[in-house]
Image: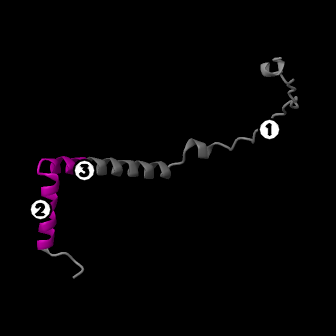
Amino acid sequence: MGSLSATHWLIIALLVLVLFGAKRLPDAARGLGRSLRIFKSEMSEMHNESAKPTPAEQAPAPAPAQPQELPPAQPSVQTPQPSPETHKA
């Protein structure tokens, strides 16, 4: 009961063919194949990069940067501007 029989797979295949059409299925399969090929090459490249040490791992760690001393902040003094409405008589 848990597995699909051959007739179930045939019905699923026919539904996919009807839903997507015979013309779009080869294009979709080709795109999926290209995607898998790119993914496989990227994964192998990632494994190759992790196997060899990078120049950053070989170089000594840089000394921590010294904090810069900033001048003390000057408070800004703003004088209130009289509004034009207060001068009306």
Per the model, the C-alpha gap separating discs 1 and 3 is 53 Å
Between residue 85 and residue 22, name the one nearer to us.
85
Per the model, the C-alpha gap separating discs 2 and 3 is 22 Å
56 vs 77, left or right, is left
Which residue corresponds to mark 1?
66
* Main secondary structure along the magenta-highlighted residues: helix
Between residue 54 and residue 13, name the one nearer to us.
13
Between residue 74 and residue 59, name the one nearer to us.
74
- Residue 59 position in % (x across, y down): 64, 42
Q: Residue furthest front?
A: 89
- Residue 4 position in % (x across, y down): 19, 75
Disc marking residue 14 = 2
The residue depicted at 85 percent of the width and 25 percent of the height is 78
Callout 3, which amino acid? Gly
Which badge, 2 or 3, is on the more N-terminal residue? 2
The residue depicted at 50 percent of the width and 49 percent of the height is 52
Residues shaded magenta: 7-31
Quadrant the C terminus occupies: top right
Q: Is residue 9 above or below residue 78?
A: below
Q: Where, by quadrant of the figure, is residue 8 drawn?
A: bottom left
The residue depicted at 47 percent of the width and 48 percent of the height is 49
Q: Are marks 1 and 3 in contact (CB under 8 Å)?
A: no
The residue depicted at 78 percent of the width and 18 percent of the height is 84
Which residue corresponds to mark 3?
33
Callout 1, which amino acid? Gln
